[in-house]
Image (cartoon, helix red, strand yellow):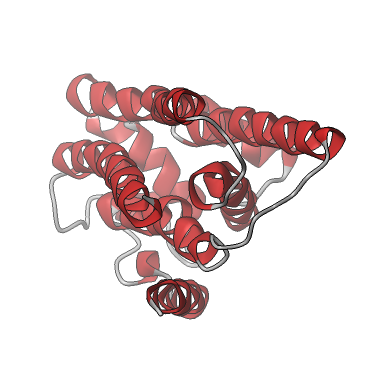
C-alpha cells in the first residue's frame, strides 16, 4: 500500500510539473527554478521507481554488465550536463548547438531515473558497493553547487551564473533586463539555490534508504 501511495504521488507531481511548472510562478526566482529541478531530478524519479522495488530483476551476467555500463554513462552524462548548465560557458555552448532549456531538462530527468535505479530496485549490489555509489552521487553534484556558491559571493551581480541561467530559461517575452525583479536579492537567491541542490539530494538519499531498508 505504501509503495502504491508513493508511486501515485510521484505520478501526480510529474503531471503537475508538466502542466504547471514551478518556475512559471515566478520565472525570475532562481531558488524557485532550483526547487523545480530538485523535484525533477531528486524527488520524482525515486518515487516512481519505488513502486517497482518489490520486483526482483534476475539478469544474466551480460545484461547486468550492460545495466552497469548504462549507469556509468548516465552518471557521467548527468554530472557533465548539470555542471555545464550552471556555468555561463556551458549555457552559451547549449545555445550555440541549439539545445533548449526544456530539452536539457528532460534529458537530465531521464538520466536521473537511471541513476536512482540502484537505490530503488533490487539490483543485487553489496552494501559496500551501494555506499560507494552514494558517495559518487554526492560528488557529481559538488562542482555545480560550488560554482553557484562561490559565484554568488565573488561575481558582480550582472554577471552571476543565475543571470545567464534564467535568461536561458526565460519564457517568451521576458528579457535579461527583468532579472532584478526578484523576491530575494540576487546573491542570496543563488546561494540558497546551491544549498537547496545538495540538501534535496542528500535528503532524498536518506529517505530512499529508509524506505528500502
> Which quadrant would the N terminus be assigned to in this image?
bottom left
In the depicted view, which residue is nearer to us: 4 or 97?
4
Residue pictured at 30% horizontal, 37% vertical: 198
Up-down relation of residue 114 to residue 126 (above or below):
below
Determine whether, in the image, residue 169 is placed left or right of residue 27.
right
Q: Position of residue 106 (x, y in %)?
A: 61, 56
Determine whether, in the image, residue 67 is placed left or right of residue 121.
right
In the depicted view, which residue is nearer to us: 190 or 202?
202
In the depicted view, which residue is nearer to us: 59 or 81?
59
The quarter of the picture where residue 23 lies is bottom left
Residue pictured at 19% horizontal, 42% vertical: 192
In the depicted view, which residue is nearer to us: 78 or 100?
78
Q: Position of residue 188 (x, y in %)?
A: 14, 40
The quarter of the picture where residue 61 lies is top right
Up-down relation of residue 139 to residue 200 (above or below):
above
Direction right: furthest residue: 62
Q: Position of residue 213 (x, y in %)?
A: 36, 50
Residue pictured at 51% horizontal, 25% vertical: 129
- Tag count: 0
Q: Position of residue 107 (x, y in %)?
A: 64, 50
Determine whether, in the image, residue 197 is placed left or right of residue 57.
left
Amino acid at each position: 500500500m505504501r509503495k502504491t501511495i508513493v508511486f501515485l504521488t510521484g505520478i501526480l507531481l510529474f503531471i503537475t510539473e508538466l502542466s504547471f511548472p514551478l518556475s512559471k510562478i515566478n520565472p525570475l526566482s532562481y531558488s524557485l527554478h532550483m526547487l523545480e529541478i530538485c523535484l525533477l531530478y531528486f524527488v520524482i524519479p525515486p518515487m516512481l521507481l519505488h513502486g517497482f522495488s518489490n520486483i526482483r530483476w534476475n539478469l544474466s551476467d551480460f545484461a547486468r554488465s550492460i545495466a552497469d555500463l548504462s549507469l556509468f554513462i548516465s552518471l557521467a552524462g548527468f554530472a557533465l550536463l548539470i555542471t555545464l548548465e550552471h556555468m555561463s560557458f556551458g549555457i552559451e555552448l547549449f545555445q550555440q548547438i541549439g539545445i533548449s532549456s526544456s530539452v536539457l531538462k528532460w534529458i537530465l530527468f531521464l538520466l536521473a531515473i537511471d541513476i536512482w535505479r540502484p537505490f530503488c530496485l533490487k539490483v543485487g549490489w553489496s552494501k559496500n558497493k551501494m555506499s560507494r555509489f552514494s558517495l559518487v552521487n554526492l560528488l557529481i553534484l559538488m562542482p555545480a553547487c560550488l560554482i553557484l556558491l562561490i559565484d554568488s559571493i565573488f561575481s558582480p551581480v550582472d554577471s552571476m551564473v543565475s543571470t545567464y541561467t534564467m535568461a536561458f530559461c526565460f519564457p517568451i517575452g521576458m528579457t535579461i533586463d527583468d532579472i532584478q525583479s526578484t523576491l530575494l536579492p540576487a546573491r542570496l537567491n543563488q546561494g540558497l539555490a546551491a544549498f537547496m541542490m545538495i540538501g534535496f539530494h542528500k535528503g532524498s538519499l536518506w529517505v530512499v534508504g529508509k524506505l528500502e531498508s
